[in-house]
Amino acid sequence: MSTLSKEHIKQLVRENNFQSVSDVNAYLKDIFKDIIQELLEAELEAELGYAKDDVGKKKIPIIAVMVIHQKK
């Protein structure tokens, strides 16, 4: 895992206009939330074999298909 360079950190501070520790904390909380969301979506995609927005590749169990056709 890599860490941010001092220049990158300075750039983040300038771009986000941090005025307090609370500002930094809120920023880190948002980034952490986004990272966790991406990790969970990647894990789900790996488990299911398709992305959540990739409707065409969904594997429907044969039982579900049979039930759908019986109801028609």
Image (cartoon, grey):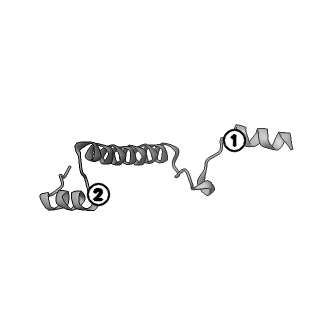
First in sequence, mark 2 or 1: give its number: 2
Q: Residues within 10 Å of mark 2 (few under 14, many from 20)?
A: few
In the picture, which quadrant includes the C terminus? top right
Tell me the tag on residue 16: 2
Residue 25 picture quarter: top left
Residue 49: % across, % down:
51, 48
Q: Is residue 58 left or right of residue 34?
A: right
Identity of the amino acid at label 1?
Ile
Residue sitting at the far left: 6
Residue 67: % across, % down:
78, 38
Look at discs 2 and 1 and give the one toward the viewer.
Answer: 2
Tell me the tag on residue 4: none
Q: Residue at x 26, y 57 (%)?
A: 17
Residue 65: % across, % down:
73, 43
Residue 62 picture quarter: top right
Identity of the amino acid at label 2?
Asn
Label 2: which secondary element:
helix
Compare residues 49 and 16 and report the one nearer the observer: 16
Residue sitting at the far front: 19
Q: Residue at x 84, y 40 (%)?
A: 70
Is 32 drawn above or below residue 12 in the view shown?
Answer: above
Residue sitting at the far right: 72
Label 1: which secondary element:
helix
Compare residues 68 and 9 and report the one nearer the observer: 9
Tell me the tag on residue 62: 1
Residue 24: % across, % down:
26, 47
Q: CA distance from mark 2 to mark 1?
A: 51 Å
For the residues labelled 2 and 1, say whether their Cβ atoms are less than 8 Å apart: no
Q: Is residue 17 left or right of residue 56?
A: left
Q: Is residue 7 left or right of residue 47?
A: left
